[in-house]
Each structure stands twice: as structure tokens, then as C-alpha cells.
Amino acid sequence: MKIRSTVAAACLAAAGIYAGPAFAIDYPARKPGLWEMQTSDGAGSKAKPEAIQQCIDAATDKMLREMGQGMGKDMCAKQDMRMEGGKMVIDSVCKIGQTTATSQAVMTGDFSTGYRLESKSTYSPPLMGRAGATTVVEARWVGPCKADQKPGDMVMNGMKMNVHDMIGGRGKK
């Protein structure tokens, strides 16, 4: 069960920055290669940030954007995205089970060398005992993928997996 939840978390993490339906403003494509993403609970959190490394190419990045957009269509009644002075701002209202999550996410960066996403959410009724949450994702391009990696490979919590294999896609060799 732990492995299954880790795999699900990895898929969500991989597609999570793209959740939402298709917009007039398209998400920028990330530079192909190895990306490292640190996820934390926001400023002042005592929890250790989680790190994910992900090897992507243009096709994998596109697949993850489309997967996230599909998740948003299924879960969200509202997804508004706009540009404000070089920042991408996304306001959403989504259902998670019986809970309504109202969120605002702000993305900055160039998607070639790095980006930052900060999302603040409130939950009604509370989700797993929490009335709200802040999530921060700091991502940076590390360089080319390692010699033993193929597009779609992710390393999370010391476990290596491939998003194409997890979702039954075309695993690249």
C-alpha cells in the first residue's frame, strides 16, 4: 500500500503544477533535462522539504501538462488564470471528496532555469483536520538527464519510477 500511495503521489507531484483546464494563457514548457523540485509547507514550516528529481523531454512535459489539465477539468468548478506583471496567477475552486478547496497559486520564473509556485488554500469543511494550507514548490533545472535516466524518470523518497510506466503511457527506452 505504501508503494501504491508513493506512486500516486509521484504522479500528482509530476502533474500538479499543471492542474487546471486549458486556458487562453498556456503554461510555458520547461527546458528538457533534469529538474529538481523542492516542495514545502511554506514559510516557517518545520517539516523537511520533499525533493523530487525528474528527467523530462518535450513530449513528457506536454503529457504532464495535459494530465494536470485533465485533473483540473474533473475536480475544479473554477480555474481562472491571468498574467500580472510577469507572474502567473491561478485562482481555483476544486472539490476534494466532500471538501471544497479555494486556492490561489502564484508562479514566477522563466521555466528554462527555474520557477517558484506558492499556493494558498482554504478548505470547507476542513480537509484531514486542516482549514487551510500553503504549499511552496521551488524548481530548478539541474542540467542534462543522467546517463542512466530516460524521459519520465523520477526519483522521490529514494525511489526511482517512470511516469510513463505509472500511467500506462509509452515508456521511453
Image (cartoon, grey):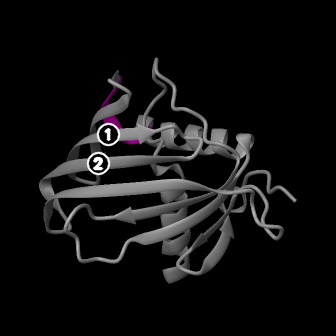
Q: Residue at x 42, y 36 (%)?
A: 20
User: For the view shown, which residue lies furthest in the top direction?
Assistant: 24
User: Where does residue 2 sit, x and y in percent of width and height?
Assistant: 49, 82
Residue farthest toward the right in the current orientation of the protein: 173
Range shown magenta: 74-82
Indicate the position of residue 136 as horizontal and vertical percent values.
33, 56
From the viewer's perspective, tell me whether residue 159 is left or right of residue 125: right
Quadrant including the C terminus: bottom right
From this view, report whether residue 17 is shown above or below residue 87.
below
Q: Residue at x 53, y 64 (%)?
A: 10
Q: Which mark is residue 119?
A: 2
Residue at mark 1: 106
Amino acid tagged 1: Val
Quadrant assignment, res 145: bottom right
Establish if 80 lies above or below 55. Answer: above
Amino acid on which disc 2 is placed: Ser
Residue 39: image x %, image y %? 40, 63
* Element on which disc 1 rests: strand
- Residue 160: in magenta span: no
What separation in Å lies between label 1 and label 2 (alpha carbons)? 6 Å
Looking at this view, is 123 or 97 the one in front? 123
Q: Are marks 1 and 2 in contact (CB under 8 Å)?
A: yes
